[in-house]
Image (tube, grey):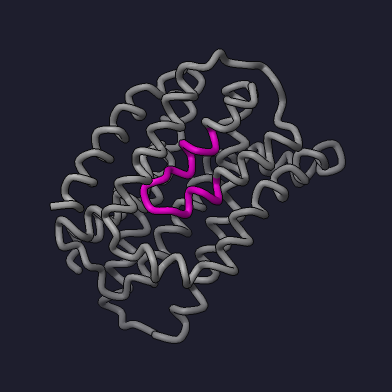
């Protein structure tokens, strides 16, 4: 993997992790169609996952500090965050290897996933917006949506934000909760991948490229996260719904050729 490839993959991860267009789907398409087969892919995956995780901390640092310092006042909110992580945690721990074996390299699955993301986003765009707080039921539903997003092509941010909007949670509150709730599964995925990486050490040359991918994903992740907050609060999800529909159809067409 050269520097340009590391930059491009870092950009794909950073941008598509937060914009509702699926990082897993785009990485799969890039690897399959552009020949982006990443040497030491697990290490690279750990790096870009940690980069996007760090970008969430940068964007929402005030909210995170408030949750820690004023944890008693925010106890119910913290509980909702934990509850929302349970479905993805169960699937990630119990079925991670099975999912990777079944769906690895499957453009057909990614194409279907893009269409599912498009459906989520179309529904979120056309339903009337609410002004509710995040509650137990909405956090559980968003957690289930996040678990579905383990499938390639299904956007984590798109599915969780859309589900929250369907439960009439206000756009400002749902986008913050959707990103904060992703901290646990993203961190968990990075931890599981790191355990595998520790068994296969790499050299300094590979570490340099991984570092390039990390920085690129981190910076682009911050930009994409802030953009997504703006898009959701201004009800600008329709272009992403159309994009996911088009790339889903294109991916299915390529997969069935």
Q: Position of residue 117 (x, y in %)?
A: 41, 37
Q: Position of residue 231 (x, y in %)?
A: 43, 24
Circle count: 0
Going 55% across and 43% down the picture, which residue do you hit? 145
Going 59% across and 55% down the picture, which residue do you hit? 88
Q: Quadrant of residue 220?
A: top left
User: What stretch of residues is rendered in magenta?
Assistant: 146-161
Between 45 and 84, the residue placed more toward the observer is 84
Q: Is residue 171 above or below residue 220?
A: above
Q: Quadrant of residue 135?
A: top right
Q: Is 204 situated left or right of 155 in this image? A: left
Going 62% across and 21% down the picture, which residue do you hit? 170
Going 76% across and 37% down the picture, which residue do you hit? 136
Q: In the displayed image of the protein, which residue is found farthest to the top?
A: 128
Q: Is residue 228 above or below residue 68?
A: above
Residue 57 highlighted magenta (yes or no): no
Q: Quadrant of residue 105?
A: bottom left
Q: Is 52 situated left or right of 39 in this image? A: right
Between 150 and 196, the residue placed more toward the observer is 150
Which corner quadrant holds the N terminus?
A: bottom left
């Amino acid at each position: 993997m050269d520097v340009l490839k590391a930059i491009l993959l870092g950009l794909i991860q950073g941008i598509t992790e937060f914009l509702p267009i699926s990082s897993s789907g785009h990485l799969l398409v890039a690897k399959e169609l552009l020949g982006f087969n990443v040497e030491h892919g697990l290490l690279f995956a750990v790096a870009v996952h940690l980069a996007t995780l760090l970008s969430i901390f940068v964007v929402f640092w005030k909210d995170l500090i408030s949750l820690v310092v004023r944890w008693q006042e925010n106890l119910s909110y913290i509980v909702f965050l934990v509850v929302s992580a349970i479905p993805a945690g169960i699937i990630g721990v119990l079925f991670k290897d099975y999912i990777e074996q079944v769906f690895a390299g499957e453009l057909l699955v990614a194409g279907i996933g893009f269409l599912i993301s498009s459906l989520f986003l179309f529904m979120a765009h056309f339903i009337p917006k609410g002004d509710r707080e995040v509650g137990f039921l909405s956090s559980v539903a968003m957690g289930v949506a996040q678990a579905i997003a383990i499938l390639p092509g299904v956007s984590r941010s798109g599915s969780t934000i859309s589900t929250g909007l369907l439960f009439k949670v206000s756009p400002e509150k749902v986008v913050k909760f959707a990103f904060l709730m992703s901290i646990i599964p993203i961190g968990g995925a990075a931890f599981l991948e790191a355990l595998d990486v520790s068994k296969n050490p790499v050299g300094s040359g590979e570490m340099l490229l991984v570092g390039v991918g990390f920085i690129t994903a981190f910076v682009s992740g911050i930009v994409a996260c802030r953009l997504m907050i703006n898009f959701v609060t201004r009800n600008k999800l329709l272009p992403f719904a159309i994009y996911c529909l088009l790339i889903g159809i294109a991916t299915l067409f390529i997969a069935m050729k």
